Image: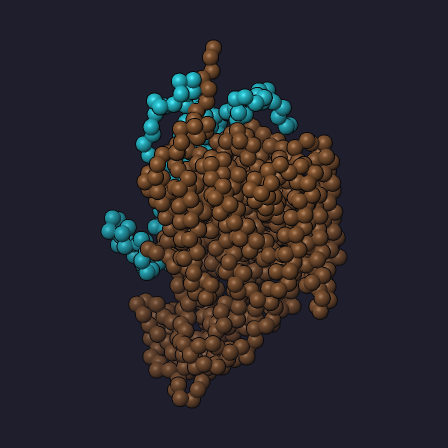
Chain colours: A brown, B cyan
Amino acid sequence: MNSEVVTGGTSLATMVTFVSYIAGVFLLAALSHRVLLRKTSFSEDFFLGGRRLGGWALAFTFAATGMSGGTFTGFPALTYSYGWVIALWIAGGLMVGSLTQMGVMGKRLNQMARKTGAITIPDVLRDRFESPALSLIATSVMILFTMAILVAQFRAGAFIIEQVFNLPAEYGFLLGLFIFAAVVTMYTAYGGFRAVVWTDVMQGIIMGIGVLILLPVILSHAGGLEKVNESIREAPPRVVTSISGPDNDLAFLLEEASTSQAEVAGVQYAGSDPLTGSPAVSLVEEGDEVFIEVRLTTGTTAREVRDAVLTDPAVAPFLADVELAYDNDGSGTLDTVAEEGDRIRYRFLHPESLLYGPGREFDGTPWLALGIAISFFAFGPIIGMGKPAGMVRLMAFRDSRTLKKAILIASVYHSVILVVLMLIFITAISVLPGHIPRGDSDRVMAIVATEIVANKGIFLTLLGAVILAAPFSAIMSTVDSFLLMISSGLVRDIYQRSINPHISERLLRLISYGTIVGVSAFCIYAAYLTRDTIDFLSYLIIIAEVGLASAFLVPMLMGLYWKRATREGALAAMAGGFLTTVALNAPVFTGGQWISLFGFHPAVWALVVSLVLGVTVSLATAPPPQYLVEKYFYRPVRGL
Amino acid sequence: MKRTESAEASPELEIDPLYQRTRREAFLIFGLWGVALLWCVGFSYLYGYETHAPVGGSVGPAIAEIIGPLEDFNRDAGELTTVLGVPDWVMFGVLVPWLVFLLVTVLFLFFVYRDEDLEPPAGPSPEGADHEQ
């Protein structure tokens, strides 16, 4: 029923916005190519912008790399689904996120990279610990995880192009994929690091302006924040059932807000006869929680679940309405078949779930329980420090005054954008009540853009188009920096430093372009192969970002700030972080939930294991050679 | 972490003061993060959660031992108060500390975080280097 709404309109304004955005990106690439031609050291300039990055550029490129396509799809969806508790979810990044991510390592990493002429993060590790093995492992881990993210972003970019330009269904995705890949490959290879950074700045400024305008527009549409809270509070409780994952849901709205849990709980009900084959529905009381429990026999369809619940004499009196939700591409239907003969439980989702923590999943389990809240507070500020795409930018800024300025700008910019986005999508809860089922909530932003702001004058239409372009430009800015990172890994860490150190500048340049094109080609192929299967890849992405960060953070901190750190310690820390992430996330690959020991997220444990291993293995092995320590921790006495 | 002092280093070398200062700054930043964590998560969990029932293996019970039964802090929709349209707990648990820590960041950058010469000693010094703007 929502599918037309959800598809998102494609107006002329949107197409024009997209085309001008892409034109702008090419213009920036051409400009940076001209700068590149004047420089002498190709790789330092192509991969690091000649270490001359200024404050505004560093701030925006940091913020933009941190925002992926998810900031404009996943984050709005979470806000829409879980309400105000999202404030606590983003709190870590709001408080000191930019200070930790740039301030903890910034000056020291920059100094060390200048000292050795390092260009990539594995480069730094190799020099600091004199260990080619460490560098090669680091490069491999980086390429593995980054590739997974890249393929998914290629796919997302292709889908957006397919929709925006109304490409025909039979070859639209493939065409979209080629257009996306051609655009992003050309400007990345042509302009290098500078083009990537300047694109980030352009994106950052446009997004900032768009989001700041959108907030008052949607707030006035809703009648103010107070009204928003009121309408959330007075919304009827609902029961949501789903038999094939979150993409295929039925939402049962209770009769009225005043229908208390106690009343519902007072109903004694034994459940349908399982022998008839229809799903058995019953109300289950546990503590002060009430669940609708549906027992499914294998082969039960969503339609049968709906009918059973609606006709159930114990439950039906409390139900006012039923909504159907299909998943994004429309493949989920009422005839989707349950996989297991299991029973599933659904909690009544009461409006306070949206006003307070911890937020509720469909089955009533808390979303942001205390341990997870603490974990997420560490996500951006602490674990985020270890993201190679962020660290490599710390090797590129000009001097420490630039860094300070960038921290200041990024602190304000990033946190203001997050808070404003949060307020926008909290407001969306009341403006679009019951419109968007959770499985489809990734489209919240698109729906806001097409329903709330479009068709209300040319100015707002343009705003809507810019908003629709937001996820696309975020995807582009992730893809370009990752393409460059993989290329630098292959060219620098593997080819130049391990196979052929005496490579000429000309050849280096050709190989750098070549790897970017090659990686893109691979991504096209992989994205095309996986276009219909989201499973494995999307699971890999869940762990890719944190896996990367938790593999790199401790070895890097040890290298920068601990004289006694040994190469064995760094290796152990890297392996520990990587393997812990993979092990604790293993159930995710079979559709399960990650393992949260003592309520904490796997990433926290990965960091703890990495730190403990790094320190103990370092202490257990022979101290590092004196000349290495002297090289990085001492300086010549300056005679007067 | 125990530091072995410069005793065994060559006499013409001294410990790099940038390394010492940046390390001190790094620890200070971690400290700031810890304070922010206590304030935000502590306040929001106490005053902003509808339920404090422990979920499997949660740290909740340990906290309950220290400050008493957490159920007293459970909230329901009727008692929500707002400040400028923002729920009370979001205002004082997230938005106010956000502004406070923005200010702290500014002060830290101006008064604690030092300007350093990042070029290697042998290389050309960037003194008086051109700054953009």
Q: Is residue A385 visible?
A: no
Q: Position of residue A340 (x, y in %)?
A: 44, 77
In this view, which residue lies farthest toward the bottom? A276
Residue A53 in picture, x, y percent from top left:
61, 33
- The residue that appears at 45% across and 85% down in the rendered structure is A278
Q: Quadrant of the N terminus of chain B?
A: top left
A11 left or right of A93? right
What residue sits 58% from the left and 30% below the top?
A398
- Of A542 and A67, nearer the camera is A542
Location of residue A58 with respect to A533 vertically, above or below: above
Image position of A197 (left or right of B112): right
Q: Is residue A371 visible?
A: yes
Q: Residue at x 37, y 76 (%)?
A: A283
Q: How many marks?
A: 0
Quarter of the C terminus of chain B within the rendering: top right
- Give the quarter of the image for residue A360: bottom left
The image position of residue A78, as x and y in percent, is 50, 57
Instruction: Give whichever of A386, A60 is nearer the camera.
Output: A386
Residue shown at the point (36%, 34%) measured from the top left: A623
